[in-house]
Amino acid sequence: MYRITLAIERLPEGPYLGTSPQLPGLVVQADTADEVISLAPLVARDLIAVMLESGEPLPDGLERLAAPTQLPILVPA
């Protein structure tokens, strides 16, 4: 399990874009910020898996969590 920061911005065209400074290549676009939040972990997991399978080193800023006992979650209002 890895901890990343997800930056979400609304694009001028209307949809939302999610990226991460710790995981270059993570790009998620969706109609709502909630959709970006839901999709980003799946995209990040697949991106990390491809990097590991291809022997590409993981970015330095990527923080691996060994056995998390507490994680923040977002609850839509």
Image: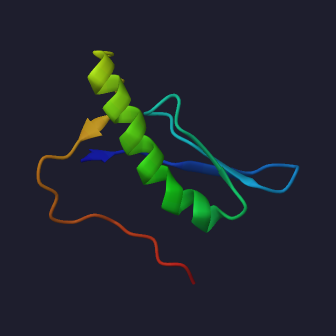
Give 53 or 20, whichever is nearer the viewer. 53
State whether residue 58 appears in this view: no
State whether residue 73 appears in this view: yes
35 vs 55, left or right, is: right
2 vs 5, left or right, is: left
* Quadrant housing the C terminus: bottom right
| Colouring method of the image | rainbow
Q: What percent of the width, then of the height, locates residue 55?
A: 28, 15
Q: Is residue 58 above or below residue 5?
A: above
Q: Is residue 44 above or below residue 10?
A: above
Q: Across the whole image, how many numbered discs are drawn on residues?
A: 0
Q: Quadrant of residue 67?
A: bottom left
Residue at x 24% of width, y 47% of height: 1
Q: Residue furthest bottom?
A: 77
Give 28 or 69, whichever is nearer the viewer. 28
53 vs 37, left or right, is: left
Q: Residue furthest right?
A: 13
Q: What percent of the width, then of the height, locates residue 72?
A: 34, 66
Q: Is residue 40 above or below residue 22?
A: below
Residue at x 73% of width, y 61% of height: 31
Q: What percent of the width, then of the height, locates residue 5?
A: 45, 46
Q: Quadrant of residue 68?
A: bottom left
Q: What percent of the width, then of the height, locates residue 70?
A: 21, 66
Residue at x 53% of width, y 29% of height: 25
20 vs 33, left or right, is: left
